[in-house]
Amino acid sequence: MSVAAPTLIEHVRIIDPARSLDAVGTVVIVDGHIVAAGTDALNQGAPDGAEIIDGRGLLLVPGLVDARVFIGEPGGEHRETIASASAAAAAGGVTSILTMPDTNPVVDEVAIAEFVMRTARDTAVVNVFPAAALTRGLKGKEMSEIGLLTGAGVRAFTDGRHTIADPVLLRRIMTYARDFDALVMHETQDAALTGNGVMNEGLLASWLGLPGAPAEAEIIPLERDLRLAALTGCRYHAAKLSLGESADVMRRAKQRGITATAGVSINHLSLNENDIGEYRTFFRLSPPLRREEDRAAMVEALADGTIDIIVSSHDPQDADGKRRPFAEAESGAIGLETLLPAALRLHHSGAVPLSRIVEAVTAAPAKLLGLDRGTLAPGSVADMALVDLEAPFLFSEDRIRSRSKNTAFENARFQGQVLRTFVAGRTVFSESDRSGG
């Protein structure tokens, strides 16, 4: 593959939380790497033949790192392929994705992980890192070969949508993962307590006549997991929290010195149970959308660092899976293209500082996964997103690059548009090219 041409972006606001940098300056890219990025970057002069971009009034951030992306390939390519997911990611300023193992076959062996990596190298325009299953076949019965998979380059282990019920097995997995410094990412939704619940248990569920899932279905497994993480000393990550009380539990665990981190989906920072309205199935999610008080508590937990990262929880479902009665519809929503603009709502409202938002989708997930991404430091790979913070746009269906259209932000109005996305210095998305394809 040919080397990307040199690029110089001048007069641009640079936010690089990994270096605590927020300043107007210049970024110079040569051979796919950042040569300089800051207020004094022009002192060395522009490279010969460089493309010069005027970044006046624009924002440059590290390429986003999305640590929770479900795809269809292999086995469910009608919902999403690695190629289509990567195109959607690029349009959202996301340059690295961690894919979940819930495929057919499950990513629980080295050969399947290598298939995902190989397919990504051949078809994806962004970086794709497959997570592997904690248990064989996601069945919660037998531990996967964590050592072999780590040796093959797997960055994290998770059972995706599934929660391991057996605490003895989970303790064994955590102990084994600790020895390989492997990250255990775990969904905290007790299937037995959730039962047939399809939305948050409460008054609204009763009004709609829908079975509810109690808050305890998330809190109890979270508390158990944190105690096991303390017992084993493993690196533990609560994949997707949604409750104010869950944030309180995580906050206390961190205060006790437990090696634990937590994520939240952009859906649970932006939406609440009232958005379900008249049984709108695009809002059937797992965990379910919660009360407004919980959404506000999650925003506060993000701001104070209790919640470490924001994920899209991109989960493509085809039309047949969503065009059903609410209780029978598949759960999940796509989110790669709306992760950043939806997060920027928190900046525009003054709820969370812009630098903290950028950190939660760049430096923090990169550090969590051990990736050499998420920064604009000189010498790093030139994965970046150029953003117009003030540009308004309507997220209509014709904008969606994912194969599936099940967005929780259908026809939402956003302020903050990705204009151009770079991976290793190459432009992999440009808003100016959208009308042409």
Image (cartoon, grey):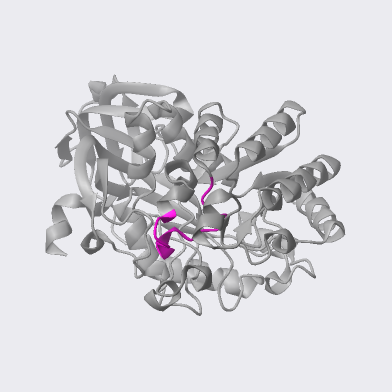
**Residue 166: within the magenta?**
no
Q: Nearer the viewer, residue 315 or 276?
A: 276
Q: Nearer the viewer, residue 28 or 224?
A: 224
Q: Farthest residue toward the front?
A: 207
Q: Residue at x 66, y 65 (%)?
A: 133
The N terminus - image quarter: bottom left
Q: Is residue 431 visible?
A: yes
Q: Residue at x 36, y 30 (%)?
A: 347
Q: Residue at x 81, y 39 (%)?
A: 230
Dividing the picture into quadrants, the one containing residue 91 is: bottom left
Q: Residue at x 61, y 41 (%)?
A: 262
- Give the magenta part as a residue range: 276-290
The C terminus - image quarter: bottom left
Residue 173, how many percent across, how many down? 79, 57
Residue 420, how many percent across, how many down? 24, 47
**Residue 287: within the magenta?**
yes
